[in-house]
Image (tube, grey):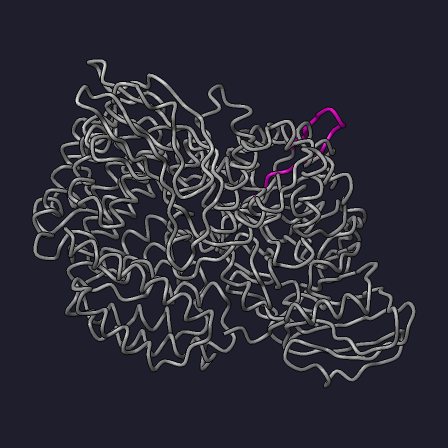
Amino acid sequence: MFPDNLTRDEAQRRSRLISTEAYAVVFDLSGREVERPEEIFLSTSTIRFAAREPGSVHVDLIADAVREATLDGRPLDPSSFAGSRLGFSVAAGDHELTVTAVVRYSRSGQGLHRFVDPADGRIYLYTQFEAADARRAYACFEQPDLKARFSIAVIAPDDWLAVSAGPPVQQAPAGDGFTRTDFGPTPPISTYLTSLVAGHYHARSHTYTGAHGTVDMAVLCRASLAEHLDDDEIVRITAQGFDVFERSFGYPYPFGKYDQVFVPEYNGGAMENIGCVTFRDEYIFRSRVTAASSDYRRGTILHELSHMWFGNLVTMRWWDDLWLKESFATWASNFAISEVDPDPTLAWATFRSGSKSVAYRQDQLPSTHPVSADIVDFEALEFNFDQITYSKGASVLVQLVSFLGRDVFLAGVRDYFTTHAFGNTELSDLLAALEKASGRDLSSWSTDWLETAGVNTLHLELDVGPDQTITTAILVQSAPADLPTLRRHRLAVGLYDDDGTGLRRTDRIECDVESARTPVPALVGRPRPAAVVVNDDDLTYAKVRLDPASAQAVLAGLETIESALSRAVLWGALWDACRDAELPAGQFVDLVLRAVLAETGLTAVSNVLGQAATAIGSYIPVGARPWWQDRWQTGLREVLNRAPAGSDHQLSVARAFVGAAEPGWAADQLVGWLGGVGVPEGLAIDTDFRWSVVANLARLGRLDVAGIDAELSRDNSITGAEQAAGARAARPDPVAKAEAWRLAVEEDSIPNGTQSWICLRFWNRGQDDILEPYVDRYFRAVEDISAGRGVWADKGLSLRKSVLRNLFPWPTDLTAFLPRLDAWLETADLSSSTRRVILERRDDVVRSVRAQQAG
């Protein structure tokens, strides 16, 4: 599945042979020397490096051709470039390699991506190089431990703005309406952190002044989005992050200026290129969003800023230790928010409701892996940018901070940065710094939390006497049979009683759990509370089960608990029990309908609404599902009627109602909303909300192609084009499905953003008859992707992932589908990374069937 692989062993051999000093990279975007300038550009890479002894080595490059290559001024044979490698031999000593390559612009979001804005015809380019895609733009030694100083230059049209890691130090006419811009050299960095942004970008300049001086900043976006750019708010968040990180990490921002660029058709959330961070431009809000969306953007901004230290200043030696940057950046962004917000617990409540809940799901999949993973090659890496690496790792760090103490932890981090600045590290280096600061041996902690996979389950066994006094209290820890590690947990147990107005915490007990059964003597002799909550305040990383009496009390009064963090823990425990077929899905749905308006955590509101929709669509038995679907849409409409006008709750519930709508009265209401009839007071049918209505009316067969095209004419933007493509794919029409499939699976030029929305909208409830032929077609497509056949020989990773994950069949009768899936899996010849995705989706099917059978 990964045609241009590089193994860890190969990278280590290359590091033993050579060291890199500097790159000079010139991107010629003029098109003057290529036949198809809208598809092809030239790059010239000059690399100064040293060989420790004679040997053979290769430089990495994914390009149409090598036009010219020289080593120490002597020509190399361009025809020796094969696959993604240009090999050559070196003597011991210093060398200079220059490679001029004919390179293709990306439409997959990898390499140098080129985009033409349908709103105004303006052109925008940006690079995305993590993890191994700098070689898609210029020749390089593509591994993180071969750091070097980079001097980048670009030849581009006179009216373009160009941005890179360093500030522009020289601009000169290049003839024919083009300008050459040279950027200042960087400190030593890895290839994946280099960048180029060029095009008709709109830019606004700012500065940050802190304890260590002034940093020049800019915020950039497409011209057609400039009216929506809230750069003052973006800079305010960034400045708060600078304050927290420079103070807490004890090291001033190391990379000069700091630009933030919002770019189109982006694969992920953002990328931490030094001094030139790129974000998906959906973070420039064209329509009203909830506080949850704003909070998510704030977390992303701070996540990328923290990478300037975790990952950029100090970089992992190889991708085994990807967590050294991603886990820490996820932790650091939430830490920064907790430092600046009046109530620090709200940041961790948001984290528990959002990122951590996804980590628990990922950690229960058959593909789970240790936080510090075994990454033998690029193929093993490509699917490890997951919530184990990001959110479980961050959760483990929360637990470590609790274990060591905040000040000791930060002292270790400061020593880590000072010792390893501009270098490369691995797990042992971080542990050494933390052990030095704390005086503790962390080897067993590392083994349990970083080097073994899986999640423990904790529950409390209580025995109560005739007078309702607790006689025995034991914390029980368990683990899956195939991942049997029991771990040390520092946690809190919350005691709750009903004071007549709701559940109130009356006491809190901290304790350590180190084995399968841990007595809690502090509970013995107390009156039995209404509810006992294990892992209250969310100090550790573990699944939590409520005892029967506590579960009954929480189901009756969850919304009355004052702490948003405690509610987040309980929402998570109940949802996990529902996913494990221990809590009937209908009970969870009823709780959401009753309690969602009282929930003050807006991330929790969004998540529990989505979880309840999953329960309806997957966990309710098929025979009972029509009743529950009507119960869900009717209940949401009633909740919407009670929601305060113009509130975030109203918007969140309205979005859920749109997705829940079935043929009949709910579909009629959506038609009315699209025409401005019957819209609840305070609810704006603005651009983005309108597209949600359009897509769901298309799903219900209430909007035809002409209607979708009319909506596109109202929003002639790339977002509009993507949403229109998704809406067409949602229609219950064989012709629409065939065209959607062709575009997503068989077409060779569709951009990544458009393909993603087609895949996301393709499978819908109530369309089984039309979609049935696509089960076998999906199986064949997976085999083609795995083998790299046809159009899949060169398609980017994001396009492959989108098909594998989002076109996975989801018929109504999963019980009948599962044997069909298993029969295919028994004979299918799939790569390990492809099979991993399918087994993850199979696990979703198995879990759904189990819940339906228990329901």
Check residue 467 for magenta coloring: no
In this rendering, the answer to whether 218 lies above or below 377 is above
Q: Position of residue 350 (x, y in %)?
A: 41, 33
Q: Residue at x 58, y 67 (%)?
A: 378
> Tag count in the figure?
0
In this rendering, the answer to whether 855 lies above or below 735 is above
Q: Position of residue 195 (x, y in %)?
A: 66, 54
In this rendering, the answer to whether 439 lies above or below 645 is below
Can residue 509 be seen in the rendering of this structure? yes
Residue closest to the eye, 600 or 814: 814
As drawn, is 387 to the left or to the right of 113? Answer: left
| Magenta span: chief secondary structure | strand
Which span of residues is magenta-colored?
206-220
Which corner quadrant of the image does residue 733 belong to?
Answer: bottom left
Q: Position of residue 110 (x, y in %)?
A: 56, 62
Which corner quadrant of the image does residue 532 belong to?
Answer: top left
Farthest-out residue, top: 500
Q: Position of residue 846 (x, y in %)?
A: 26, 61
As drawn, is 154 to the left or to the right of 488? Answer: right
Can residue 721 be seen in the rendering of this structure? no
Residue closest to the eye, 267 or 119: 267
Residue closest to the eye, 220 or 305: 305
Q: Residue at x 56, y 40 (%)?
A: 303
Residue closest to the eye, 420 or 673: 420
As drawn, is 17 to the left or to the right of 833? Answer: right
